[in-house]
Image: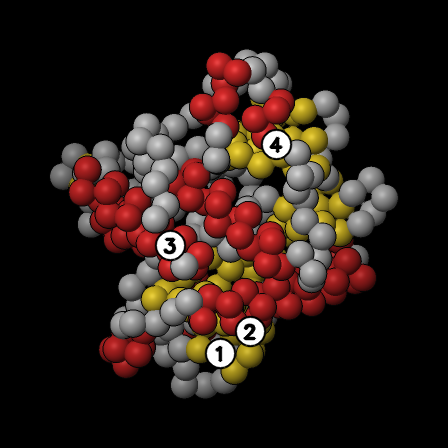
Amino acid sequence: MITPSASALHTSALTSLPLLARGKVRDNYAVGDDRILMVASDRLSAFDVIMGEPIPGKGELLTQMALFWFDKLGHIVPNHLTGDDPESVVTPAEVPQVRSRSMLVQRLQPIPVEAVVRGYLAGSGWKEYQESRAVCGVLLPEGLTNAARLPQPIYTPAAKAAMGEHDENITFERTVEMIGLELATKIRDISIALYEAAAAIALEKGMIIADTKFEFGLTPAGELVLMDEVLTPDSSRYWPVEGYEAALAAGENPPSYDKQFVRDWLEQAQVNGKPWNKTAPAPRLPREVVEKTAAKYREALERLTA
């Protein structure tokens, strides 16, 4: 049984290290000029807006899940973990802020492409398919339905957006223009291999990985390295196998282990008597939504590591 610490961390406040950036979930601190301390907060973002209420235990669960997958997939591509203890680079007073929720990683040159792999038709992919029978320029067969399994996984990259902006779906050809044919092809092939290996492991545990995104960076020597988070419910769409067939037959979204619970609540949330317009500030999340979302993250990790 995974039991995260009781207190939630919305925003870390380390003073012993220089803050590099705060993302939607992670706070990154410089450790010298060659390492980064990544602290996974309990923040949750939906529709690219950070919620005011943290999800207790979320950062710890995300970190443990990412470490699980880095371990399982290390034979496919190197990852950014240094193997050093995150608690060793902060003061004793700051240890509670980093314990179980941090990774000490190599400082890399990030590649501005989100490597998205889809094994099933869902979310923005389903919307795009309905309009054009294609996703990010990848033509698909006629007659597919929402949540349908694809004949084989497809690579549908996105251009990384600035903070607060939406990532933009792009074609593989566009990634070639951005980073060159050799690197674009390598990222595509490795991403599909990572997805296929992870999907097989997850299926054995009774979970479907519908889609996921990977991020990569380059070392000073030019080596390609898997970085950031990997295969967490924040970066992936996880469905339990129970309920999938019924949802597919009904043309509905299957139950999921990601933040869909929060998204569904926000879709019907009202602000000043009108539907929320998906810009900050977000409506206050009810306690029930926070607790059910925390339980979903916990259940996903428990099933995976059982």
Badge 1 density bin: few <14, some 14–19, many ≥20, Cα 10 Å: some
Residue 150 — which label? 1
The residue singled out by tag 2 in the image is 153
Residue 85 — which label? 4
The residue singled out by tag 3 in the image is 302
**Gap between marks 3 and 1 measured at Cα:** 27 Å
- Which residue is the extreme one toward the left? 273
The residue under the point 23% across, 38% down is 285
Q: Is residue 196 visible?
A: yes
Mark 3 residue element: helix
Query: x%, y% of residue 93?
Result: 49, 14
Res 209 → quadrant: bottom left
Callout 1 amino acid: Leu
Query: x%, y% of residue 276?
Result: 25, 42
Check the picture and name the quadrant holding the C terminus: bottom left
Front of the two marks 3 and 1: 3
The residue under the point 40% across, 77% down is 148
Mark 2 residue element: strand
Callout 3 amino acid: Glu
Is there CB contact under 8 Å for labels 2 and 1? yes
Mark 4 residue element: loop
Badge 2 density bin: few <14, some 14–19, many ≥20, Cα 10 Å: some
Mark found first going from the N terminus, 3 or 1: 1
Callout 4 amino acid: Asp
